[in-house]
Image (tube, coloured by chain):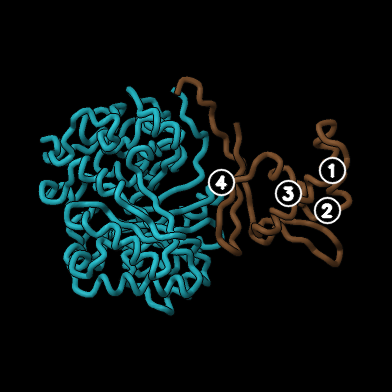
């Protein structure tokens, strides 16, 4: 099992992201909203319809923006991590035998 | 034996054994002057670079009194935007301008020790007059500057009747949370243990009686919240020793970072791996369910039972009749700190 942790220096905090949020964070690499939508749908289909994927993506992007993890450039309509924000996956061994 | 966390995320730097106070219960047995053997500024900055390069996300800095080091603000400035930075302090060296500076350099949270709700209680503990007022002033200044701030206290016989008042005081001066910590048999606390230690019943009564004001978070680690945090614990002391947890400082030494990269101590020391595996003789089911860990605190388990996998006597379900007011004789002998174990 892996968990994903993001540090945001602007408003110092650590966030633990679930796998969906981590995927979106990873995809917000300066691409446009349109390309982000396509990439996200490609990652989640056939588990999600295009509409479900879009709605889900909007919710996650909104949450990541609110937390200061990603930012939107309104001029060129791209999404990327806030300056200094960085994340890592941290491997957590299974709890077998605990 | 498989350790639960493959690579650490957070680390504590117990960054100095010096302090501007003379606390009666000091676990470090601090002195007014820092030792020349403490990690230098350059060594600390290299360590921070190492932590960032190796995926650490958070550093928790405590002491002694970290701000008693002349270079502390430089160190905090260096790590403030690279790592989530938490600072534990007695608050006596924080005024308005310093609080604003801590905010500006990116310190993420400050935890201020208050050892009672009354000036007399706190100042008697701290060994200097006026400490309480300065500590409360620090909390207020930090809150004013926009730094998330908590209050910490160590529950003991001298302040047990002031816990509720302390919660209310902390809330009044703007703290977000209060952490009530158990008393550990370390340093000066160990030497005055019969005067300050409470029975487990007395501790549980005190914790159960608490009614935090609305909006104030309460952190405590008694039943059913007794957690075994060794699974993720990483600490480097003032001299560069990798010790897992500050509460293990008198019992272990996994290697010194001046000679051994920290992650080598993490991955290769057999005892370190064993403690992080979480394997214990038995565990309280309620604490396990709430915390996701087994067995409770390894430091107090080892202190009272002399075994690393013993149950924690600070949990009411695994106390097994241990009187927490009485320390085992072996703890009062010359420190039996484990010598550096060979790298596997």
Element under disc 1 = helix
Look at discs 2 and 3 and give the one toward the viewer: 3
Labels 1 and 3: the sequence-earlier one? 1
Residue under label 1 = A39
Residue under label 4 = B55
Q: Are marks 2 and 3 on the same chain?
A: yes
Structural crowding at the residue carrying mark 3, measured as other residues with C-alpha within 10 Å and reported as few (<14), some (14–19) or many (≥20): some
Element under disc 4 = loop
Q: Are marks 4 and 2 on the same chain?
A: no
Q: Are marks 1 and 3 on the same chain?
A: yes
Labels 2 and 3: the sequence-earlier one? 2
- Proximity of marks 4 and 2: CB atoms separated by less than 8 Å: no
Element under disc 2 = loop
CA gap, disc 1 and disc 2: 10 Å
Q: Quadrant of the C terminus of chain A?
A: top left
Structural crowding at the residue carrying mark 2, measured as other residues with C-alpha within 10 Å and reported as few (<14), some (14–19) or many (≥20): some
Q: Is residue B176 above or below residue B311?
A: below
Which chain: cyan? B
Look at discs 4 and 1 and give the one toward the viewer: 1
Is B229 displayed left or right of B125 in the figure?
A: right
Element under disc 3 = helix
């Amino acid at each position: 099992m892996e968990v994903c942790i993001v540090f945001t220096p602007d408003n110092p905090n650590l966030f633990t992201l679930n796998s969906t949020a981590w995927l979106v964070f990873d995809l917000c690499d300066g691409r446009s909203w349109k390309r982000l939508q396509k990439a996200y749908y490609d990652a989640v289909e056939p588990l999600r319809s295009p509409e479900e994927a879009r709605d889900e993506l909007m919710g996650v992007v909104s949450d990541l923006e609110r937390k200061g993890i990603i930012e939107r450039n309104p001029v060129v309509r791209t999404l990327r991590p806030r300056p200094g924000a960085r994340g890592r996956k941290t491997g957590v061994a299974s709890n077998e035998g605990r | 034996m498989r350790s639960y966390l493959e690579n650490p995320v957070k680390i504590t730097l117990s960054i100095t054994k010096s302090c501007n106070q003379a606390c009666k219960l000091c676990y470090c047995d601090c002195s007014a002057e820092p030792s020349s053997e403490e990690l230098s500024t350059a060594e600390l900055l290299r360590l921070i670079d190492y932590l960032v390069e190796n995926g650490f996300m958070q550093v928790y800095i405590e002491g002694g009194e970290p701000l008693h080091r002349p270079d502390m603000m430089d160190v905090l400035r260096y790590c403030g935007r690279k790592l989530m930075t938490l600072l534990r302090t007695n608050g006596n060296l924080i005024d308005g301008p310093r609080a604003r500076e801590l905010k500006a350099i990116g310190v993420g949270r400050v935890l201020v020790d208050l050892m009672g709700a009354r000036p007399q209680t706190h100042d008697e503990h701290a060994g200097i007059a006026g400490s309480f007022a300065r500590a409360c002033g620090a909390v207020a200044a930090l809150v004013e500057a926009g730094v998330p701030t908590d209050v910490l206290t160590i529950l003991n016989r001298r302040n047990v009747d002031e816990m509720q008042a302390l919660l209310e005081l902390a809330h009044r001066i703007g703290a977000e949370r209060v952490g009530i910590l158990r008393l550990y048999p370390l340093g000066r606390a160990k030497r005055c243990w019969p005067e300050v230690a409470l029975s487990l019943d007395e501790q549980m009564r005190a914790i159960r009686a608490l009614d935090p004001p609305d909006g104030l978070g309460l952190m405590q680690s008694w039943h059913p919240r007794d957690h075994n945090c060794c699974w993720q614990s990483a600490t480097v002391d003032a001299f560069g020793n990798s010790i897992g947890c500050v509460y293990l400082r008198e019992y272990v030494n996994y290697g010194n970072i001046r000679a051994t990269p920290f992650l080598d101590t993490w991955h290769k020391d057999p005892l370190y791996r064993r403690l992080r595996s979480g394997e214990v003789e038995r565990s309280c089911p309620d604490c396990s369910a709430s915390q996701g860990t087994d067995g409770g605190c390894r430091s107090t388990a080892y202190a009272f039972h002399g075994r690393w996998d013993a149950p924690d006597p600070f949990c009411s379900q695994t106390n097994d009749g241990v009187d927490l007011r009485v320390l085992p004789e072996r703890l009062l002998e010359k420190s039996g700190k484990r010598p550096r174990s060979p790298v596997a």
